[in-house]
Image (cartoon, grey):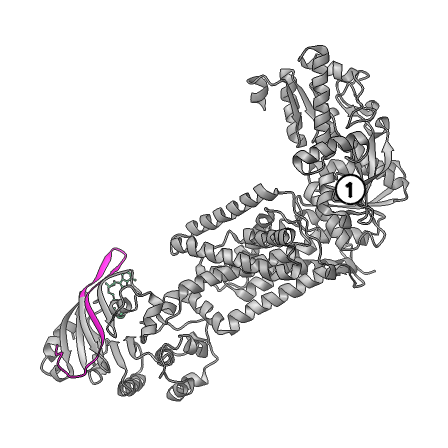
Amino acid sequence: MRRWVENDNVDMVAGLVASSVTIATTKVLEENNKLGLVNGSAASSITNEHCTPNHIHYAYDTYPLANGTAGAIVKEGGKTWYILTADYAFGHSMEKDVTAVVEKNGGEVIGSIRHPFPTPDFSSFILQAQASGADVIALANAGADTTNAITTAAEFGVTQAGQTIAGLVVFLTDVHALGTEVAQGLQLTTGWYWDMNDEARAWSDRFMEETGARPTMVHAGIYSSTIQYLNAIEKTGSDDSQIVRKQMMDTPINDMFATNGRIREDGRMVHDMYLAEVKTPEESSGEWDLYKIVRTIPADEAFRPLADSSCKLVSSK
Amino acid sequence: MSQNAGKEYEQLRISGLHAFYGESHVLHGIELIVNRGELVTLLGRNGAGRSTTLKAIMNMVGRRTGSIMINGEETMSCAPHNIARLGVGYCPEHRGIFASLSVQENLTLPPVVRSGGMSLEEIYSMFPNLYERRFSQGTKLSGGEQQMLALARILRTGANMLLLDEITEGLAPVIVEKLGEVLLALKKKGLTIILVEQNFHFAAPLADRHYVVEHGQIVEEVSASELHAKQSVLDGYLGV
Amino acid sequence: MSMIFGVPMAVLYGQLLIGVINGAFYALLSLGLAVIFGLLKIINFAHGAMYMLGAMGTVILFDTLGVNYWVALFLAPVLVGTVGVLIEYFLLRRIAGQDHIYSLLLTFGVALIMQGILTNIYGVSGLRYSMPDVFKGGVNLGFMFLPFYRAWVIVAALIVCFGTWFMIEKTKLGAYLRAGTEDSQLMQGFGINVPLLVSLTYGFGVMLAAFAGVLAAPIYSVTPVMGSHILIVVFAVVVIGGLGSIGGAIITGILMGVVEGLTKTFYPPASSAVIFLVMVVVLMVRPSGLFGKEA
Ligand SMILES: Nc1ncnc2c1ncn2[C@@H]1O[C@H](COP(=O)(O)OP(=O)(O)OP(=O)(O)O)[C@@H](O)[C@H]1O
Ligand SMILES: [Mg+2]
């Protein structure tokens, strides 16, 4: 990465997945005054304490995920919460965010359990969550841990018994792997869904033709952010990172990915987020027909307000 | 050795047999012949190569050259598990009783290789001790009982050539006597027996012929009738 | 409700049962390792990969040929067992009798190759295998909801474990195995085809692993790396039980499942380490393992 930027004169870096790698990379970008477009990473700290003038966090982050999902569920009456937390930094901070959101909305966290990462068998933890009698079992974990926990919960009849599962970091591919049979009724927050409007659908059809699968919000984010970047270069006739960034910040984003999108001074691209619910097998008309959008979370409400930001770039600081 | 004895049948013919354990060269051109129904001993001092000769017949040594014919069939390229199928029963030095098997399991372990073997009942009536203790662990038998077990289990297989290595080792005289009776009975049934023996007084009255092994070679052959005449030569070889 | 150290009894019973279920997997896997070690004197590092092949095979057989669960329960272990026999025949046999390090590296290499190939084709994110319809749902035991499938896992694993134990301790074939473990050369001298026995034993050992894999397919996430996680735990189980004891492998497997389950209740962060802790303690107090013969 350092070699690309320093020796090969690469001007822009896109993608960037693991949060810790992303944060390290953005430092290199800042030293060299290049530009990074972050899509895959989840940590909201990337545009908070770790913000730089040299990257833009585009598709989503943990803040709207916790806020959107947990907030919505408390409002629907899920008052008592039990949290299954992956026992490492990401899980801990997720647990903290969720607890804050739940309490702010008048709910209560009555228990939590920290499970090893990764955990191949969740039966023991699900059993404990079940015994807690909480209205909601929240999963402060990701990837295989989340899908394993959801599968096990379905097996042990958690939802039939009246408890709700809240997955906090759930991607389309996870739900696809789980299937509607197991994941039905699961509520989650997403920055984009392939079937949410005509423009998204058209683009997704092209993606499907190329890859054989439907895109996630990360795929769409990478595409959208790259187009925005190239447009900005075309407009300004420059490839200087700050000129390009300024141009991108001045351009509202409304495309196949984002509605009401704009890039804030901290590098956060805010846009409407969506609370989605996984369809039942009866509702689902195909392999990838997985979500129904329950609510649109307006851009200003979804992401961490600048007022709460600890980013050095925020002018009011 | 006389080849003119009418219908004599060569059950075993070994010629030019060399055997090696890794780098160490143990047998240096063994030559011997055993006819059907004969009881032949291999005598010699410790370390002479007698056990190794039996193991070589069983294809249980590292490497061999030369020729070993069993029933007129060359066996040098025969896989170890196919030797027994030619009707060979092997009773190893130190008995080779399996600790994790019961007496009865030990007894029935070797597959039957020919018809005409003894049945379990016959064996139990020959060795009543084994019957009484048939469910105990093989190695929980006394030394003598284990020796009987080691012998009995190859009698069941129907093997018609027995390779017996030091079967009297460490046994009380009464049991040795009993084993002698068993061997005579087997000989009467027409079995061929090759006996590696330290106890010359046990072997002498049973055997038709004796081979003396020294440094991996046959250095002397003595038939039962010559025993008296060659006694001093034998004593010299055996260091008695 | 009565409590133990702040944990309701009902939860405790549930955890015990869950422990037995997970222990059933450990038992099946360590049993196979013990069988293989007994005759071949090698520690089979490919065991986890064979477990994975059983699970992946079940999914792949279903996805490509529509093979259902019951057929897979039989077919996948047989196929994996065949792979095992081939591995023994073409690879392990060549290094028989050499230093342990060779067989260790070889089996480890085989595991990595299998993992690598399947990762290339299927990725590591996990395949989905739907629960067979007959197992949907469960029964409320009062202290917990027991999914039918988990109950089946216990039953199936116990049947196979007991069957294997019976086969080894009580039958003629088992006597060959036990005797071969002690002195395979003498066995050859008796006319027993030991090389064949060795191939079949290896095949059988990995079949047990594959069977565990099939059982795991509907409840654990099926990925090419699933075997490497569980293998390390199973090695610890085998060390605790003492290599070479068939009954010991089964009992220790179930016992360690329970120990792990209880740890998940009382102190979850230690649950992935507790088996290794037990291992260290056992090694200090009884180096040959709980059921191993004292050296
Ligand atoms: N497994 C082995 N590896 C290496 N050398 C061996 C092995 N077995 C025997 N030898 C050597 O081969 C030679 C012959 O041994 P063998 O066992 O045939 O002697 P023996 O005539 O049966 O004597 P004993 O009366 O002591 O049984 C000995 O020098 C011995 O050291
Ligand atoms: Mg000897």
The residue depicted at 46 percent of the width and 68 percent of the height is C178
Instruction: Using the rendered image of the protein, determine whether residue B200 is visible from the camera's viewpoint.
Output: yes
Q: Position of residue C253 (x, y in %)?
A: 60, 60
The residue depicted at 79 percent of the width and 64 percent of the height is C141
Side of A316 relative to A241 (left or right): right
Front residue of C271/A40: it is A40
For label 1, the SS is loop
Query: Which part of the image, by quadrant, shows the N terminus of chain B?
Result: bottom left
Q: Which residue is disc 1 drawn over? A: A289
Front residue of A50/A156: it is A156
**Position of C134 relative to A257 (above/below):** below
**Position of B129 relative to A298 (above/below):** below
- Boundaries of the magenta span: B1-29
Q: Residue furthest left?
A: B229
Chain letter of the residue carrying label 1:
A
Q: Position of residue A32 (x, y in %)?
A: 62, 16
Magenta stretch secondary structure, dominant: strand
